[in-house]
Amino acid sequence: MGNVQIKGVTKSYGGVRVMHGVDVEIEDGEFVVLVGPSGCGKSTLLRMIAGLEEISGGQISIGGRVVNDIPPKERDIAMVFQSYALYPHKTVAENMGFPLLMAKRPKAEIAEKVNRAAEILDLTKYLDRYPKQLSGGQRQRVAMGRAIVRDPQVFLFDEPLSNLDAKLRVTMRVEIKELHQRLKTTTVYVTHDQIEAMTMANKIVVMRDGRVEQIGRPLDLYDRPVNLFVAGFIGSPAMNFLQGKVATRDGRQVVLTDQGIALPLDGVQVEDGRAVTYGIRPEHITIGEGGIPVDVSVFEPTGSETLIFGRVGGVPIDALVRERIEEEPGKTMSFRLDPRKAHVFDQVTGQRL
Amino acid sequence: MKRSNPWLAVALWTLISFLTLFPIYWLFVISVKPAVDLFSTPDVLLTSIDWQNYIKVMNDSTLRGYMMNSLIISTGNAVLVTTLGFLACYALTRFDLAGKESVFFWTITNRMAPPAVFLLPLYLLLTQVYVIGDFKLADTHLGMILVYCTFNLPFAIWTLRPTLDGIPKELDEAAFVDGASAWQVISVVIFPLARPGLAVTLILTWVFAWNEYLLAATLTNFNARTLTTGLSEYVTTTGTEWGIMAAISVFTLIPALIVFGMVQKHIVAGLTFGAVKG
Ligand SMILES: Nc1ncnc2c1ncn2[C@@H]1O[C@H](COP(=O)(O)OP(=O)(O)O)[C@@H](O)[C@H]1O
Ligand SMILES: [Mg+2]
């Protein structure tokens, strides 16, 4: 069973603590994405699972077995590195067969498994080539081939797509997802790209500064971020934030900004007078009568939708709308905020209310 | 950009090649002249070839012994220091050793001192300290192989460091995850990738040991006497046998050329290693 348990794991480098007690439960067959800004400790955590980095405190188990003191080769894991880490002096076939060679499998079995993996990954034509004769995407697939031939309990990926151009990234994203659906091997995938996280994961772990901020299914994180950090990190374009105080107007609760603009709320239980941060995603704003007045500066039409950049009381606010806008920039437009999609956070702690 | 005149380049390289090869040619001319002709006809043209000197040298079993000693000592030393230097650089580039930069610097400072500085201490070590019963390290192959480590090991560590630094650590890590042991990582992944650097190191340390004179002359008597020291035996109070010395010198050059030729491909690869990576 390829489940992974991470319990109270800490990590220090020479007295400096960079990981402060991380707990994550990963079920067998899950695709878990560790996401967060650069330097938050994603790679460190992944490398601790792999056994490439010592665990300073806490416990990691794979398949029910505590692996803290077990070397990588005995953990039954496979890893795909950001740089692919292909052996430059070995052919594609030799690269992919390497884990099996190390496991002293018979030659015939190695050849058969390498061929099967090459077929899955569309690499059959390239088996005799050397890594330097391949394109970025092909190298990426060889690295995955090397991981899948041995059928490990867990796949570990560390930003495998960040060296590819944007278009290839999308293609490979789909390929990795398809591969997971086909093999159903537990996967831990590290990225700083929240789109990758949202599109690929069964479960996302959002990290910041060596701590877990939130764990959940992609749409749960999108719908109910537990704090300002997750709210701002998940979703693109990013959520708008406006400061204000909760007040009651005409029998309805609203958030009142310093300029006296009322931001609509629905079904949020917060006492009047509390200082809050009001969050609304650009895609939950429409253009129409009865909204808040926004000074619009730039339109970005993409064809299918239009991104509108504006300011309300000096604070930036963006809207993403389906329709095409035939207005001149520089005028004031009325933004209608969907109260059911509004998020409210405590101004001091940043926690969701 | 204007292309430089090809004829100028040809002329320049011809001149440089001539300057480099002429002394070797002259050496050969001297070695194939009878002794009586040497000073009577002081020209550098090859008028006749007389293999007399070579026959003398080859029939001299003492000289053959010296040649064997030189081969054993140089090869033994080069293989030893290249192996040790390789492992040392693996440790220096892969592990977080406390004070490793100081260790590295201290090691290479050993190469910077003039060999003569070490002469007396090494002499005492080999004749007085490393003595087991009747066995002394002085005047043995093993003794000379170890003595040359003093200079060649720091040199090997110094030349191999960039090679090992240039092999990404992620390759080691990938191999570890793929199930390799530390030894397999070194032998199956690191070693093949370090080959150009290893070849360069092997040849340069070999040439140092092969050419070394001062220590060999002091620390050997007969059993481990090398070809370079053998040369000096032909400078005597009654005269210098230039012809014989030239023939021996040619013999000294040949193995160096052969070794160089064998690893030349790797040396060129080694010099451009940074450029072809990736
Ligand atoms: N070998 C190391 N020595 C000291 N600090 C390190 C080392 N590796 C990583 N760190 C620190 O640990 C933190 C997490 O790093 P990392 O896991 O690489 O972040 P991420 O992969 O999320 O970008 C960073 O602050 C980084 O500076
Ligand atoms: Mg990282």
Image (cartoon, coloured by chain):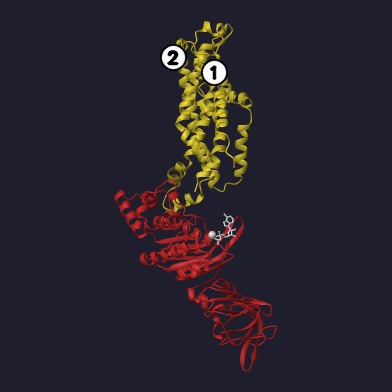
Q: In the rendered structure, are the residues bearing label 2 and label 1 in contact, judged by CB atoms less than 8 Å apart?
A: no
Spot occupied by residue B278 in the image (x, y as percentages of width and height): 49, 48
In this image, B267 relative to B98: left or right? left
State whether residue B17 is above or below residue A83.
above
Beta carbon at label 1 within 8 Å of ligand 1: no
Image mark 2: chain: B
Chain corresponding to red in the figure? A
Residue B178: x percent and y percent?
Answer: 42, 53
- Residue A8: image location, x then y, percent: 53, 66
In the image, A218 versus B13, the foreground residue is B13
Q: Of discs 2 and 1, which sits in the foreground?
A: 2
What residue is shown at x 63% (from left), y 32% (from top)? Answer: B112
Please rate how many residues cluster around mark 1, counting C-alpha atoms within 10 Å: few if below 14, some from 14 to 19, many from 20: many
Quarter residue A319 falls in? bottom right
The residue under label 2 is which amino acid type?
A: Met
Have a look at marks 2 and 1 and say if they share a chain: yes
What color was chain B assigned in the picture? yellow
* Chain of the residue displaying label 1: B
The residue wearing badge 1 is B229
Q: Is residue B83 visible?
A: no
Q: Which mark is residue A314?
A: none
| Residue annotated with mark 2 | B58
Q: Name which quarter of the figure residue B127 lies in.
A: top right
Figure label count: 2
Residue plotted at (62% across, 38% down): B106
Whole-Å distance between the Cαs marked 2 and 1? 17 Å
Q: Ligand 1 falls in which quarter?
A: bottom right
Determine crowd level at label 2: few under 14, some 14-19, many 20+ residues with C-alpha closer than 10 A: some
